[in-house]
Amino acid sequence: MHQATGGARRDSSAPRFRVHPYFLAGAGALVFDPTGNAGGFVSGAQSQSRAAFVYGVGADYDLSIHFAVRAEYRGFVYGRPDFDLAPLHSGATTHSAEPSAGIVFRF
């Protein structure tokens, strides 16, 4: 799965104890490519794209003026792919979660 998304981030209140909480929302596209599956191959499966709604929350913890550590949770809501295979078509909406952590550098 590949993603291309954009959105807006809104910092909540003033930082407390060097913690900067925020939330985000946006939209984008998810691309599903079953041929990249190293474990197997499904005959007739096609790559497919789906529009997605993105939301999330996170917080930055300041280590210094220029560095912070970040913890974030992002969720994607999208139509389940069927790879153009009739037995997989359900029309269902599904959700994927993407927790992450990282280092922030501000300049």
Image (cartoon, helix red, strand yellow):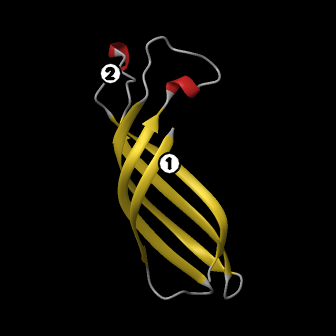
Distance CA(mark 1)–CA(mark 2): 22 Å
> Residue 65: x, y in percent?
67, 88
Which three-letter amino acid code belongs to the residue tagged 1?
Ala
Q: Nearer the viewer, residue 88 or 27?
A: 27
Q: Quadrant of residue 31?
A: top left
**Left or right placement of residue 66 versus residue 30 in this view:** right
Mark 2: amino acid? His
Quadrant (top left/top right/bottom left/bottom right) for the C terminus: bottom right
Residue in view at x 48 percent, y 56 percent: 74
Q: Residue under circle 2?
A: 89
Which is nearer the eye, 26 or 77? Answer: 26
The spot of residue 45 in percent (x, y) is 44, 18
- Nearer to us in this view, 64 or 13: 64
Q: Identify whether 53 is placed above or below 46.
A: below
Residue at the disc numbered 1: 97
Crowding around mark 1 (Cα neighbors within 10 Å: few <14, some 14 to 19, many 20+) is few
> Which quadrant of the figure has residue 24?
bottom left
Mark sitting on residue 105? none
Query: Quick one: SS at disc 1?
Result: strand
**In this view, 105 is above or below 73:** below
